[in-house]
Image (cartoon, helix red, strand yellow):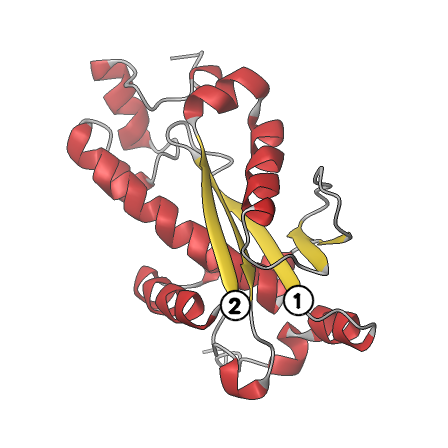
Amino acid sequence: MAAKKVWNKEEKLQYEKVLQAKGCRFIAGVDEVGRGPLAGPVVCAAVIMPLDDESLVIGVDDSKKLSAKKREQLAEEIKNKALAYTVVEVSEEEIDRINILEATKLGMKKAIEGLEITPDIVLTDGNMTIDISLPQHSVVHGDALSYSIGAASIIAKVYRDNLMVEFAKEYPHYGFEKNMGYGTAAHIQGIKEHGLCKIHRRTFTKKF
């Protein structure tokens, strides 16, 4: 059995430390969850974390690598310790109107602009350029490599998962509480039997 990887703060803070050395005090991480699902909004979160050793949230990582229970626990700790954070939903109607890439960029822009503290620089996941006036730096696999982006990914994922669990009560035919809106076999079967519901993305479900 492979040894469990130990959480390494030097590794997780590599981008933040370089920026701090350049004089950046407030570093925002921003990430999205829900670009691929057939239903529900895309959710973007931005967060500015304190970076001193005493305030670090141990275990922050790419949200997809963590169990649901661990994500919930970390999300609470991140929100409690954050200097500032925001969560923004971009609806399925807006996704259909402007496309998922533009909807994601819009959500990230709103999340950053909604922060109570203006960041000195913004770290984004992937190679996303956002229409903001602030300096920004994109990090491929940033949710796994950057502490700030990882923290944003966890907040966004927990928020969106909880939202989809609530939607499952309203629209019980699609298994949203299990698939979070992604196109699983059970979800697609639900569409075939019951048609589309209000929160389905029409541009994602044309073939159904």
From where the camera sits, is residue 172 visible?
no
Q: CA distance from mark 1 to mark 2?
A: 9 Å
In the rendering, at what x and y percent does residue 6 appear? Answer: 53, 82
Q: Residues within 10 Å of mark 1 (few under 14, many from 20)?
A: many
Q: Residue at x 24, y 34 (%)?
A: 167
Disc 1 or 2, which lies upstream in sequence? Answer: 1
In the rendering, at what x and y percent does residue 157 appear? Answer: 42, 51
From where the camera sits, is residue 79 visible?
yes
Q: Amino acid at mark 1?
A: Phe
Q: Name the disc covering residue 157, or none.
A: none
Establish if 33 lies above or below 104.
Answer: below
In-image side of 87 versus 100 (left or right): left
Q: Quarter of the image for the C terminus: give it.
A: top left
Q: Are marks 1 and 2 in contact (CB under 8 Å)?
A: yes
Residue 22: which quarter of the image? bottom right
In the rendering, at what x and y percent does residue 119 appear? Answer: 66, 59
Q: Residue at x 50, y 70 (%)?
A: 60
The secondary element bearing badge 2 is classed as: loop
Q: Closer to the camera, 161 or 6? A: 161
Q: Name the disc covering residue 83, or none.
A: 2
Residue designated by label 1: 26
